[in-house]
Image (cartoon, rainbow, N blue to C red):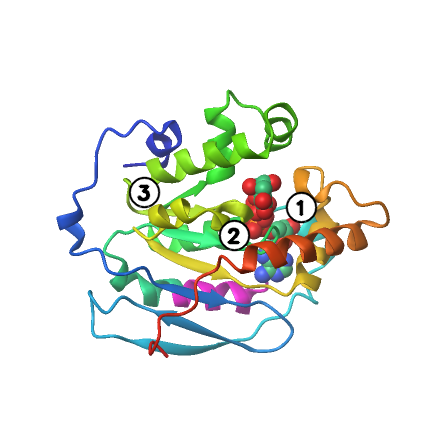
């Protein structure tokens, strides 16, 4: 089913689970982007293949991306970083069997940026759950939804969207940063592969400060300079959200 259908959330085709084999326990991996080399551990489901853990060295730096590129919103990560991501995506493809990839992580962790690159490599469609929520609520922005209906309403709509997406396949889904806080959302995301973009809060604050906090109602309160404002709020939110992130499967590395 193509992304237009997904975006209309008209579920004309329910994916037959047997087409993709048993649904293994969900697998997740961490992708940290920071100044130090990060090891990216990719866990693939034991149900589909012999258990395989690949420790891959992923080193990258965001120092050498000029602020202007970041602000353009169409960041072209340095060739090495984008190439690494494309290669890792291709390595993951045989294990996916068409299942969706859910990118989870804090605001600014790169879910949209990474998601678009991954979807191209995998021949998947890209979906942004925030955009689908906005569509569900008549095109109102996330900021307007928070202002007019409140956070709980937004979270309920987000859960509805994730439920509908869980019936589709061949999608890379950029989730909203807060999606991890609801167990029911994990029930839906478990039907695919969740990928945690685990980025240091300092980097998150730098990125958010570069693009501004106008589109992120939960960051838009603190007084002070954009970096401090973003850092303070992100640090508070991180404490709340990190508790909901899954630990790697025991024995999987
Ligand atoms: N790996 C990266 N290195 C540096 N900047 C990045 C990286 N990934 C994303 N960004 C920048 O960070 C900001 C947030 O990225 P985005 O993909 O929108 O994050 P999310 O969807 O998780 O909120 C954007 O300005 C983007 O250009
Ligand atoms: O962390 C959160 O609670 C939120 C993150 C946002 O998505 P991004 O992570 O794409 O900014 C958006 O869903 C909303 O502002 C709430």
The secondary structure that most of the magenta stretch takes on is helix
Task: Answer whether residue 86 is magenta in the image.
Answer: yes
Which of the two discs, 2 and 1, labels the residue nearer the N terminus?
1
> In front here: 7 or 225?
225
- Find residue 55 and report its image quarter: bottom left
> In front here: 144 or 3?
144
C-alpha gap between disc 2 and disc 1: 16 Å
Structural crowding at the residue carrying mark 2, measured as other residues with C-alpha within 10 Å and reported as few (<14), some (14–19) or many (≥20): many
Could you say which disc has been placed on residue 111 in the image?
2
Which residue is denoted by mark 1 in the rendering? 72
Query: Which label sits in the foreground, 3 or 1?
Result: 3
Task: Answer whether residue 107 is magenta in the image.
Answer: no
Q: Position of residue 19 (x, y in %)?
A: 14, 49
Against 50, is 145 above or below? above
- Find residue 249 and report its image quarter: bottom left
Residue at far top of view: 138
C-alpha gap between disc 3 and disc 1: 31 Å
At 47% across and 69% down in the image, what residue appears?
A: 84
Which of the two discs, 2 and 3, labels the residue nearer the N terminus?
2
């Amino acid at each position: 089913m193509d992304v237009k259908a997904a975006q209309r959330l008209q579920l004309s085709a329910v994916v037959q689970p047997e087409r993709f084999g048993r649904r293994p326990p969900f697998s997740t991996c961490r992708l940290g982007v920071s100044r130090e080399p990060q090891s990216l551990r990719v866990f693939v489901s034991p149900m589909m293949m012999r258990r395989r853990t690949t420790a891959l060295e992923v080193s990258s730096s965001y120092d050498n991306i000029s602020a202007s590129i970041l602000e353009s919103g169409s960041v072209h990560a340095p060739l090495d970083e984008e190439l690494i991501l494309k290669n890792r995506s291709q390595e993951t493809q045989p294990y996916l069997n068409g299942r969706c990839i859910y990118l989870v992580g804090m605001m600014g962790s790169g879910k949209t940026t990474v998601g678009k690159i991954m979807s191209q490599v995998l021949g998947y469609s890209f979906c942004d759950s925030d955009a689908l929520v906005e569509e569900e609520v008549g095109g109102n922005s996330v900021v307007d939804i928070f202002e007019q209906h409140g956070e709980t309403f937004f979270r309920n709509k987000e859960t509805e969207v994730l439920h509908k997406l869980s019936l589709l396949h061949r999608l890379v889904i950029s989730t909203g940063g807060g999606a991890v806080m609801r167990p029911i959302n994990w029930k839906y995301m478990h039907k695919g592969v969740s990928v945690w973009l685990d980025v240091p809060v300092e980097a998150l604050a730098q990125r958010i400060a570069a693009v501004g906090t106008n589109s992120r109602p939960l960051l838009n309160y603190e007084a002070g300079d954009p970096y401090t404002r973003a850092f303070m709020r992100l640090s508070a939110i991180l404490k709340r959200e990190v508790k909901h992130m899954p630990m790697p499967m025991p024995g999987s590395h």
